[in-house]
Amino acid sequence: QVQLVESGGGSVQAGGSLRLSCAASGDTYRRCRMAWFRQALGKEREGVAVIDILGRRSYADSVKGRFTISLDSTKNTLYLQINNLTSDDTAVYYCAAGSPIYNFFSSEVYEYWGQGTQVTVSS
């Protein structure tokens, strides 16, 4: 099993930055890929960033250049650095883990999820 606990969300003004954290525990082999998803009110959950156990990163087009995903294996912690926040970034952000081999930005391929952390951006 894998347990994921997010933190770092909050309320920020547009143009600001946040760093989200996801503390992971449990079987490492069950989390060959880790990802950040977000879900805005009334919208579907969308994948924004993915990283694999070798450190290879992928981003959704909508966040490229502003979001950075990283993994500190010594601390078993996943991070998401978000810069230049806009109101469109307001959402609950979720950490996910699993061993998908395709569709890395689909929520259906990840087995383990955190409880989410709210990010609210005000203009």
Image (spheres, rainbow, N blue to C red):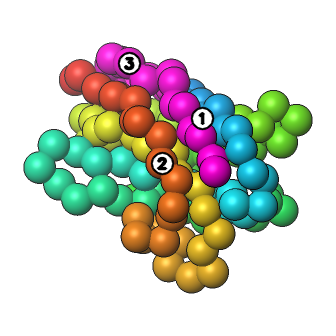
Amino acid type shown at disc 2: Trp
Whole-number angstrom distance, CA of label 2 to CA of label 1: 10 Å
Whole-number angstrom distance, CA of label 1 to CA of label 3: 15 Å
Q: Is residue 102 magenta?
A: no
**Most common SS among magenta residues:** strand
Mark 1 closeness class: few <14, some 14–19, many ≥20 residues within 10 Å: many
Q: Residue at x 35, y 29 (%)?
A: 119
Above-or-below relation of 87 to 56: above
Q: Which residue is mark 1?
A: 22
Residue found farthest to the front: 1
Q: Are marks 2 and 1 in contact (CB under 8 Å)?
A: no
Whole-number angstrom distance, CA of label 3 to CA of label 2: 19 Å
Q: Residue at x 30, y 56 (%)?
A: 45
Does residue 79 appear in this view?
no
Question: Does residue 88 appear left or right of residue 79 in this picture?
Answer: left
Residue found farthest to the left: 42
Q: Which residue is mark 3?
A: 10
Residue 72 pos. (x, y %) = 80, 38
Question: Does residue 121 appear left or right of residue 78 in this picture?
Answer: left
Q: Which residue is mark 2?
A: 113
Q: Earlier in the sequence, mark 3 or mark 2?
A: 3
Q: Earlier in the sequence, mark 2 or mark 1?
A: 1
